[in-house]
Image: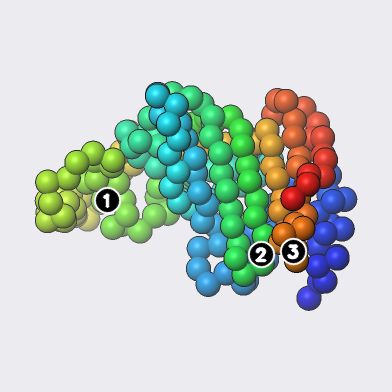
C-alpha cells in the first residue's frame, strides 16, 4: 500500500491527467463498495439554472469521458444545447475527488450501437419504454410498455433507439483532490484552452 506522501508525489508530478485518472479509477474499483465509475454530471438549462445527477462512466481515453443517456431527457437536451458539461467523481473509500469540465459531443452511431449491444436485454427494452424526464402516468404503464416491447422483439436483438446515444466530454480542466487533516487538502489542477493544447498544471489552495 502506497503512503499518502507517495500518492501526493504521483499526483503533483504527473504530466498526463487522463492516465492519472485511470490509475485512480482502477484503485477505486478495488476499494469502493459498488459503482466506482459513478459520477455526478452537471448541466445548465436554457434559463441558466444548473442540473446535476449521478450517472456511470462507460469509457475514458485520450479523447474524453463517455456516458450514455436518452437524448430527449433533461440532461440530453441540455448537453446538446450548450455542448458543455462537468463531471465529479468522489471515492469515499480513498478520500479522493476528481472534477472534470469540458466540451461535449455525441459519440458516433457505430460506438453507440456497439455499447448498446452489450447492455442487458431489460435495459435495452427500458431505453425504448422510458420517456425519460417526462411525466409518467403510473409505474404500471412503464412495466406494461416493457412487456409489450419484449413480445415485439421476442427472438430478436433489440435495436438501439434513435433517441438513445452517448456523449463524450473532452476535458479542458481536470482537478485532482486528496483529503488531508485539518482541511488542508491537496489540490492539483490541469488546464488547457482547447482539446489539442498541452496541459498546464498548478497547485491550488484547499
Q: Position of residue 79 (x, y in %)?
A: 45, 31
Residue displayed at 69% across by 37% down: 173
Q: Is residue 32 above or below residue 188?
A: below
Which residue in the structure is indicated by mark 1? 126
Horizontally, is 164 left or right of 115 in the view?
Answer: left
Which residue in the structure is indicated by mark 2? 95
| Alpha-carbon span between mark 3 and mark 2 | 14 Å
80 and 120: which is toward the camera = 80
182 and 192: which is toward the camera = 182
Numbered disc in front, either 2 or 1: 2
Mark 3, other Cα within 10 Å: few <14 / some 14–19 / many ≥20: few
Which residue in the structure is indicated by mark 3? 182
| Alpha-carbon span between mark 1 and mark 3 | 46 Å
User: What is the quadrant of the N terminus in the image?
Assistant: bottom right
Which of marks 3 and 1 precedes in the sequence?
1
Q: Position of residue 68 (x, y in %)?
A: 44, 44
Q: Position of residue 76 (x, y in %)?
A: 39, 34
Amino acid at each position: 500500500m502506497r503512503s499518502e506522501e507517495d500518492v501526493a508525489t504521483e499526483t503533483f508530478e504527473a504530466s498526463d491527467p487522463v492516465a492519472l485518472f485511470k490509475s485512480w479509477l482502477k484503485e477505486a474499483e478495488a476499494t469502493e463498495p459498488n459503482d466506482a465509475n459513478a459520477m455526478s454530471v452537471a448541466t445548465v438549462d436554457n434559463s441558466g439554472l444548473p442540473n446535476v445527477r449521478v450517472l456511470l462512466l462507460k469509457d475514458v481515453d485520450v479523447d474524453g469521458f463517455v456516458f450514455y443517456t436518452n437524448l430527449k431527457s433533461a440532461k440530453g437536451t441540455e448537453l446538446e444545447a450548450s455542448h458543455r458539461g462537468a463531471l465529479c467523481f468522489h471515492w469515499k473509500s480513498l478520500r479522493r475527488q476528481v472534477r472534470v469540465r469540458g466540451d461535449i459531443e455525441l459519440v458516433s452511431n457505430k460506438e453507440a450501437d456497439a455499447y448498446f449491444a452489450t447492455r442487458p436485454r431489460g435495459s435495452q427494452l427500458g431505453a425504448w419504454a422510458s420517456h425519460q424526464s417526462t411525466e409518467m402516468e403510473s409505474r404500471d404503464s412503464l412495466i406494461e410498455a416493457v412487456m409489450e416491447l419484449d413480445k415485439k422483439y421476442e427472438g430478436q436483438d433489440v435495436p438501439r433507439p434513435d433517441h438513445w446515444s452517448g456523449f463524450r466530454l473532452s476535458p479542458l480542466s481536470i482537478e485532482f483532490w486528496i483529503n488531508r487533516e485539518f482541511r488542508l487538502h491537496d489540490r492539483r489542477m490541469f488546464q488547457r484552452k482547447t482539446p489539442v493544447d498541452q496541459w498546464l498544471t498548478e497547485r491550488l489552495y484547499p
